[in-house]
């Protein structure tokens, strides 16, 4: 039975942070027709659109936390990650693994979480940082919608954070996987999936 008491909460509850997931240099410098990880059509444009969320967060004094997937060049930390469709990616000696600093206006005052797995929570100090910042609402952008964004969202949900994902600033491995992941996240928190314009207005209201 569907929850008869479910309600759509405000976009921002308490203090927000913008979480920029795996927007790395490879998105903008790798034009290979065959990539180590499949990207849906329009992937690069959606990642570039995330810059609008970053700019809006900065204007409202909302913390910006970048998340970077990175693996050791000797492959020792991949674990089961190569058992599926993904090939070797995000090696620490590859310049394509760096945060897309120019495109995303990455600054020394931003926070950076490096991860070896899909979720930003797994094996990192992400939650310690969120506690220190006294964050209640996580606003997610980046990729992949169906992998790192989804799994970070789920861990945040299970840790009792309010979670939002900007639907036009995320992209998946395919359109079908992207759409399914957005539905799965909306299933967990009603009103979780929001457009960039709504988030801009919500951030602006914080500084008004």
Image (cartoon, grey):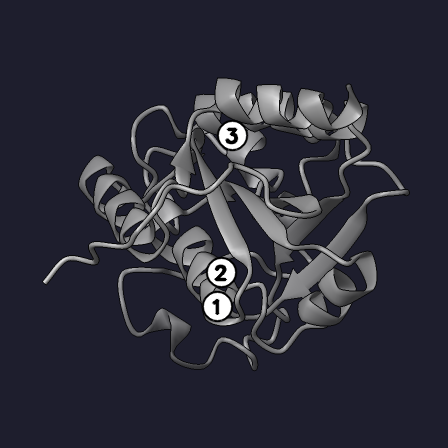
Q: Nearer the viewer, residue 202 or 175?
A: 202
Q: Is residue 27 left or right of residue 4?
A: right
How far apart in space, not on screen, are marks 2 and 3 (Cα)?
A: 17 Å
The residue carrying mark 1 is 155
Q: Is there CB contact under 8 Å for labels 2 and 1?
A: yes
How far apart in space, not on screen, are marks 2 and 1 (Cα)?
A: 5 Å
Which quadrant is the N terminus positioned in?
A: bottom left
The residue carrying mark 3 is 47
Q: Does residue 199 lie above or below 9 as drawn?
A: above
Residue at figure coordinates x 38%, y 56% from the top left: 147
Which tag is nearer the camera, tag 1 or tag 3? 1
Q: Does residue 150 lie above or below 127 as drawn?
A: above
**Residue 103 seen in the current view:** no
The residue carrying mark 2 is 152
Q: Is disc 1 surrounded by few (<14), some (14 to 19) or many (20+) residues within 10 Å? A: some
Which tag is nearer the camera, tag 2 or tag 3? 2
Q: Does residue 196 lie above or below 143 as drawn?
A: above
């Amino acid at each position: 039975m569907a929850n008869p008491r479910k309600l759509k909460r405000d976009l921002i509850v308490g203090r927000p942070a913008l979480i920029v997931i795996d927007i790395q240099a490879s998105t903008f410098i790798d034009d290979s027709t065959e990539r180590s990880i499949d990207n849906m059509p329009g992937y690069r444009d959606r990642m570039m659109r995330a810059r609008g969320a970053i700019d809006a967060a900065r204007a409202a004094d909302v913390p910006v936390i970048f998340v970077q997937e990175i693996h050791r060049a000797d492959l020792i930390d991949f674990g089961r990650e190569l058992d599926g469709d993904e090939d070797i990616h995000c090696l620490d000696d590859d310049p394509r693994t760096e945060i897309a600093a120019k495109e995303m206006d990455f600054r020394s005052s931003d926070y950076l979480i490096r991860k070896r797995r899909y979720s930003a929570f797994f094996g990192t100090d992400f939650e310690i940082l969120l506690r220190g910042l006294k964050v209640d609402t996580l606003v997610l952008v980046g990729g992949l919608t169906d992998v790192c964004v989804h799994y970070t969202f789920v861990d945040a949900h299970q840790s009792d954070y309010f979670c939002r994902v900007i639907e036009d600033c995320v992209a998946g491995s395919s359109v079908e996987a992207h759409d399914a992941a957005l539905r799965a996240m909306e299933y967990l928190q009603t009103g979780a999936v929001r457009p960039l314009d709504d988030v801009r207005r919500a951030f602006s209201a914080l500084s008004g």
